[in-house]
Image (spheres, helix red, strand yellow):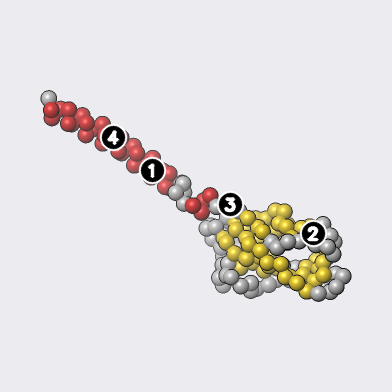
Amino acid sequence: MRSQSAVEFLTTYGWAFIILMIVLLALFETGFFNPGTYSAQQCVLTSGFGCLNFFLYSNGLLYVNLQQSLSAPINITALGCNSNAIIANMQAPYNPPSNQIFLPIGANYTFTIQCYSGSSTVIGNSTFSGALAVNYTNDLTHLPSTAVGKLTAKPT
């Protein structure tokens, strides 16, 4: 009688253990235990600029709709996106003949720029975290400035 009780005990708990392992394996495969799956996407620039909308492709192309709310109109002269702490590979917006984008106070514009993960343009499918820089010139004072912010995005 004791051995029958022990066999029933082991069988019941064996099946429960197998089911638990299958559930844990399924959760692991779906990325449930990966914190990168749940990281919030953010695009935060210095005061005077806002990211209205943005998305990043796995090939490194970033589409970002920037709004400027500075006290004067500006000309955006270059943008850069890099995972390193320093901004390199600044890109002038395509707008011949000046390759600048004029933004009056409160206006927005959608830019397409290449983001770099180190020296590579391919971001892959992991969450990208880096810096976004906007070079601009104040249209009234003609003084150049740079706004730098943080970008965290999951490529699509």
Residue 107 appears at what percent x and percent y?
A: 82, 57
| Label whose residue precedes the other's in the sequence (2 or 4) | 4
Q: Image quadrant of residue 150?
A: bottom right
Q: Say how many tags the image has.
A: 4
Question: Real-space Cα distance between discs 2 and 4?
Answer: 62 Å
Q: Image quadrant of residue 86?
A: bottom right
Which numbered disc covers residue 15? 4
Q: Dot 3: what SS?
A: loop
Identified at 34% across, 37% down, the residue is 19
Judging by the rendered image, the residue that carries numbered circle 2 is: 69
Callout in the foreground (1, 2): 2
Q: Dot 2: what SS?
A: loop
Identified at 59% across, 64% down, the residue is 130
Pointer 4 local density, CA inside 10 Å: few below 14, some 14–19, many at least 20 = few
| Label whose residue precedes the other's in the sequence (1 or 2) | 1
| Label whose residue precedes the other's in the sequence (1 or 4) | 4
Identified at 77% across, 70% down, the residue is 136
- Quadrant where the C terminus sits is bottom right
Which numbered disc covers residue 24? 1
Question: Real-space Cα distance between discs 3 and 4?
Answer: 38 Å
Which sits in the foreground, 145 or 77? 145
Which sits in the foreground, 118 or 87? 87
Residue 28 appears at what percent x and percent y?
A: 42, 47
Callout in the foreground (2, 4): 2
Which numbered disc covers residue 114? none
- Quadrant where the N terminus sits is top left
In the image, what residue type sits under mark 2? Answer: Ser
